[in-house]
Image (cartoon, rainbow, N blue to C red):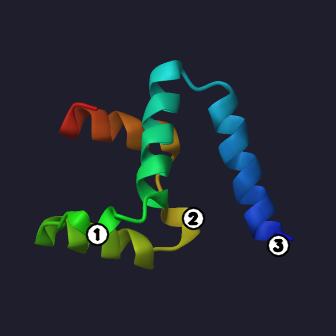
Amino acid sequence: MMDISNQLLHQEITDKLKTAPKEVLEVVLSYLNGISNKNISQFELSEEQKESLLNIRNRSYSEHTDVDIFINEMSEKYGI
């Protein structure tokens, strides 16, 4: 059983994905498939990537970026 914060997060994600374009859904699906893959340790992150992930992990939920802004930033930075 999910606690209330997990339910709210699940609902927020579901609501955003309902109106997401196909391209975004494909990226999300690829990401989910990647994190569920048990062979994920076959690559190594750069120090910059490790530091970025630690910064994200340590910030509060209220400081996280809206998914639309995040996707635009990643698209600009990495061409995805």
Q: Which residue is drawn at 52% across and 73% down?
A: 60
Q: Do the residues labelled 3 and 1 touch (CB within 8 Å)?
A: no
Taking the image as shown, residue 17 lies to the left or right of residue 69, namely: right
* Helix, strand or loop for disc 3: loop
Badge 3: few (under 14), some or many (20 or more) residues near its Cα, within 10 Å? few
Which residue in the structure is indicated by mark 3?
3
Q: Closer to us: mark 2 or mark 1? A: 1
Task: Return the residue nearer the eye: 77 or 41.
Answer: 41
Q: Which numbered circle lies on residue 41?
A: 1
Q: How far apart are marks 2 and 1 (CA)?
A: 30 Å
Q: Is residue 59 above or below residue 21?
A: below
Q: Which of marks 3 and 1 is nearer the N terminus?
A: 3
What residue is shown at x 40% (from left), y 44% (from top)? Answer: 70
Residue type, label 1? Ser
Are dots 2 and 3 in contact, CB under 8 Å?
Answer: no
Q: Residue 50 carries which label?
A: none
Q: Is mark 2 on a helix, strand or loop?
A: helix
The amino acid beneath tag 3 is: Asp
N-terminal of the pair, mark 2 or mark 1, is 1
**Residue drawn at 70 percent across, 57 percent down:** 9
Image coords of residue 49 (percent x, y): 21, 65
Whichever of callouts 2 and 3 sits on the residue coming sooner in the sequence is 3
Q: Residue furthest front?
A: 39
Q: Is residue 58 left or right of residue 60?
A: left
Q: Position of residue 44 (x, y in %)?
A: 17, 67
Give me the disc on residue 62: 2
Q: What residue type is labelled 2?
A: Ser
Mark 1 crowdedness (10 Å alpha carbons): few <14, some 14-19, many ≥20: few
Q: How far apart are marks 2 and 3 (CA)?
A: 18 Å
Q: In which quarter of the image is the N terminus?
A: bottom right
| Closer mark to the observer between disc 2 and disc 3 | 3
